[in-house]
Amino acid sequence: MAAKPVDRRARRLVVLVSGSGTNLQALLDEIAATGVAAYGAEIVAVGADRDGIEGLARAERSGVPTFVRKVKDYGTREEWDAALAEAVAAHEPDLVVSAGFMKIVGKEFLARFGGRFVNTHPALLPSFPGAHGVRDALAYGARVTGCTVHFVDDGVDTGPIIAQGVVEVRDEDYEDEGVALHERIKEVERKLLVDVVGRLARNGYRIEGRKVVIQ
Ligand code: GRF
C-alpha cells in the first residue's frame, strides 16, 4: 500500500506587533536564512494596533504585507476585536504569533484563532503576568526570571505553556529599573520563539489540557 503523503506545505504565519519588533525580526531572519521549506513556515502578514512603529517598518523592509487596526477607530472594544480577527483571517494563517503585541484580544478573535494563537511573555509564567512582567519580577525580588512562549486563552497570560527560558537577575538590574534585564530576556526570548514556532510548524502539535505536545 502506498505511504500516506507527507504534508510539506509551509505553515502560514501572521505576526502581531506593537513596538520595536525584534522578535519579528528574529523570525524574518531565520526564515530568510533557513528557507521557507526547511523552516516550515512563512510570515504572510504583520499586523499592529498602532502606526509608526519599527515592527511595521521591519515587515515593510522585508516585503511582508502589513495592516493596522487601532482600538480608537472603533466604537467598542468588541468591534475592534472583530475587525482585527477579520484582518488576520484575510491572510488565512495556520498560526498567529503575538510578538510584543500589547493588546488583549477578545471573544471573536479567540473563537477564530484559539489553539493556534501563540504569545511570548517576558517572565516565567504563571509568575508576573500582564504588561509589566520584567518590572514586577524585579520589584518582587525574584533571583531568576525569563520568558514564556504559550498559547493564548481568555485570561491574561494564562494559556498552556509551550516553552520557557531562564535568565538570572543581577544586583545591578535594580539600577536601571530592568532595562538591561529586559534586553537579556529578549536575547533568550528571540531564540526560544524562533525555535518554538518552527517546531510547531514542522512537527504539528496537540494541546492536552495544560500540556502542549509537539509531535
Ligand atoms: C518582548 O519582551 C515581549 O515579550 C514583550 O515585549 C517585548 C517585545 O519586544 N511583550 P520586540 O517588539 O519584539 O522587540
Image (cartoon, rainbow, N blue to C red):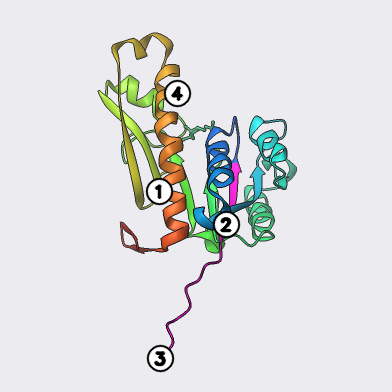
Asked which quadrant contains residue 32, the reply is top right
Q: Is residue 115 visible?
A: no
Task: Name which residue type carries label 1.
Answer: His
Lateral position of residue 30 relative to residue 75, left or right: left
CA separation in Å, label 3 and label 1: 39 Å
* Earlier sequence position, callout 2 versus callout 1: 2
Tell me the residue at 41%/49% (across/down). 196
Rendered view: 43 above or below 146: below
CA separation in Å, label 2 and label 3: 42 Å
* Earlier sequence position, callout 3 versus callout 4: 3
CA separation in Å, label 4 and label 2: 30 Å
* Earlier sequence position, callout 3 versus callout 1: 3
Answer yes or no: do the residues labelled 3 and 1 have beta carbons within 8 Å? no
Q: Which of 157 and 100 is in front in this view?
A: 100
| Outermost residue, right side | 73
**Is label 3 or label 1 in front?**
3
Task: Name which residue type carries label 2.
Answer: Phe
**Is label 4 or label 2 in front?**
4
Q: Which disc number belongs to residue 150?
A: 1
Q: Residues within 10 Å of mark 2 (few under 14, many from 20)?
A: many
Q: Is residue 201 visible?
A: yes
Does 160 lie within the magenta span?
Answer: no
Magenta range is 1-16
Residue with the mark numbered 4:
183
Q: What element carries label 2?
A: helix
